[in-house]
Amino acid sequence: MKRSAFALFVDVMGVRQDLVPTSDRQSASAAFERCRDRLEHFHHDLAEIVGQEVPLILIRDAGLPLPIFVAEFSDAAYIVGEQFGSVAIPALFLMRRALRHEYPLRGGIGVGSFSHENSGVRTDRERQVWTTSSFLGGAIVTAYQAERSSAAGLRIFVHPHVMRRNTEPFLKPYVMPLPASENTADSSHELRIWRADESRAATSRLLTFRQKQALSDRAARHYDATAGAYDRFGKVRKELPHILPAHWL
């Protein structure tokens, strides 16, 4: 059934680079294990946040509907909901948890049409099982476009179409405009991940994570851009409703 919805797309960065074959077997093995550890954290965090933490916040505190659809892949996931807050709050929780568990996460939020269909399960004589699930729509496309924005950073980018829904609860306190140099047709705003009083500690945690890695110049620019965004978050005095303080920072 086709409906209008908001979608969050999140992606763990660096997986492809970690899994590229190399002649240095020891280095390749270390990269594989690092990738596996990061994805294990990602999937555990996703399950815990969507299955346990977010339902309490959305229903009890914010009065928002739960996400209507979750699709989980090896290094990425889609979360779809009927309201902006239904995907923005999970996005905030995921980004905070990603920094805590030290894996590079990035995402985008879009809006538009959405449809999901289960195409069924079939088996053959060799006992092979083939199950199909199809999901599509403008919400899926715009969320992906926002995440693929040319702006760098471990951040959640917001597609311009989302900003047209200016009556959505939590849109104004959660979202802030991108600097002019980062504003594109695919992302004009970003999700504010930290409160003003959290941004300095979050930046310190980010830089510690960065220093633990041997990053290429291309990868390092994402951390520079993220630190810049955290600094801007620190200048915003508005609250982040229903987002619990990060006492672990």
Image (cartoon, helix red, strand yellow):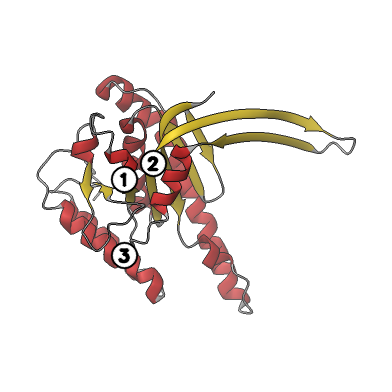
Q: Secondary structure at mark 2?
A: strand
Q: Earlier in the sequence, mark 3 or mark 2?
A: 2
Residue found at x 41% / y 75%: 216
User: What is the C-alpha distance between the residues marked 1 and 2?
Assistant: 8 Å
Instruction: Name the amino acid, label 2.
Output: Gly
How far across and down, in percent of the image, does residue 144 sit? Answer: 45, 48
- Within-10-Å neighbours for mark 3: few <14, some 14–19, many 20+: many
* Image height of 62 relative to 43, above or below: above
Residue found at x 23% / y 40%: 174
Cβ atoms at labels 1 and 2 below 8 Å apart? no
Left or right side of 31 for 49: left
Instruction: Name the amino acid, label 1.
Output: Pro
Q: Earlier in the sequence, mark 3 or mark 1?
A: 1
Of residues 219 and 23, the one drawn nearer to the viewer in this rendering: 219
Q: Is residue 56 visible?
A: yes
* Image height of 152 relative to 131, above or below: below
Q: Secondary structure at mark 3?
A: helix
Q: Looking at the image, is mark 1 or mark 2 nearer the viewer? A: 1
**Mark linked to residue 96:** none
Residue to which mark 1 is pinned: 160
How far across and down, in percent of the image, does residue 240 sit? Answer: 19, 38
Cβ atoms at labels 3 and 1 below 8 Å apart? no
Q: Looking at the image, is mark 3 or mark 2 nearer the viewer? A: 2
Instruction: Name the amino acid, label 3.
Output: Tyr
**Mark linked to residue 223:** 3
**Mark linked to residue 110:** 2
